[in-house]
Amino acid sequence: MSTNQEPTPEPAPQAEDAAPPTPETLMQAATQRIAALEAELAEMKDRWMRAEAEMANVRARAKRDVDETRQFAVQKFGRDVAEAAENLRRGLHSIPAAGTHAPEIVAKLREGFEGIERSFIALLERNGIVATDPTGASFDPNLHQAMAENESADHPPGTVIQAWSLAWTLNGRLLRPAMVVVAKAPAAELGAPKLNTTA
């Protein structure tokens, strides 16, 4: 029998196992993870709130645009209707008033047209078309178009003393400006004595 036996290799030294986590390191890792998740949640919430605010703005803009379109889509038609109302008014003023020497049929005709004008104006007002008589008001270039200036000692300068037509608006927006005559200060009377400014 052979007594030559190969020596049994010694086991290789094993690496030391990693130290088991302590409760403090576990708590620190958990705290860091929670902080990261909370930051991510805050960022997502901020993005969501911004998106919601943007959508609310878009909805509000769209609603405002639709409302304005609905309110002012008839603007051209409103101008034409206002012109028709002005023509009706001019025609009515050309008919002699009651109590004049006009025949009775003319007085009845005027009464009929006055009733038509009242109902027509009421119909326009129900639909947002409003006429305003500027006589006696201060001149407003946004609502009035000055056709002439007359000297007047009875009215302050810049006062509308006569309206050739009314101011027409549609839901507060100008359709047709009023054609007006505006008061201005009277010129100094001719022949007034001049002050002697020489020494």
Image (cartoon, grey):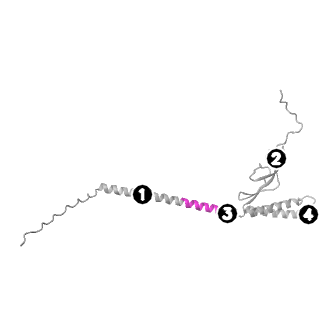
The Cα atoms of the two marked residues, 2 and 3, are separated by 39 Å
What's under tag 4, amino acid-wise?
A: Glu
Residue 147 lies, in percent from the top left, at 82, 52
What's under tag 1, amino acid-wise?
A: Glu
Q: Give residue 99's mark.
A: none
Asked whether disc 4 touches disc 1, contact meaning CB atoms under 8 Å apart, the reply is no
Circle nearer the viewer, 2 or 4: 2
Res 174 → quadrant: bottom right
Task: Return the disc, 2 or 3, that comes first in the chain's sequence.
Answer: 3
Task: Return the disc, 3 or 1, that comes first in the chain's sequence.
Answer: 1
Residue at x-position 59% and y-position 62%:
59
Residue at x-position 62% and y-position 62%:
63
Read off the residue under disc 3: 69
Q: Could you tell me which secondary element the residue under label 3 belongs to?
A: helix
Read off the residue under disc 2: 183
Task: Return the disc, 2 or 1, that comes first in the chain's sequence.
Answer: 1
Q: Is residue 186 above or below residue 112?
A: above
Read off the residue under disc 4: 104
Q: Could you tell me which secondary element the residue under label 1 belongs to?
A: helix
Q: Give residue 38's mark.
A: 1
Q: Which stretch appears magenta? A: 53-71
Q: Main secondary structure of the magenta part?
A: helix
Circle nearer the viewer, 4 or 1: 1
Q: Could you tell me which secondary element the residue under label 2 belongs to?
A: strand
What's under tag 2, amino acid-wise?
A: Ala
What's under tag 3, amino acid-wise?
A: Thr
Residue 95 lies, in percent from the top left, at 88, 61
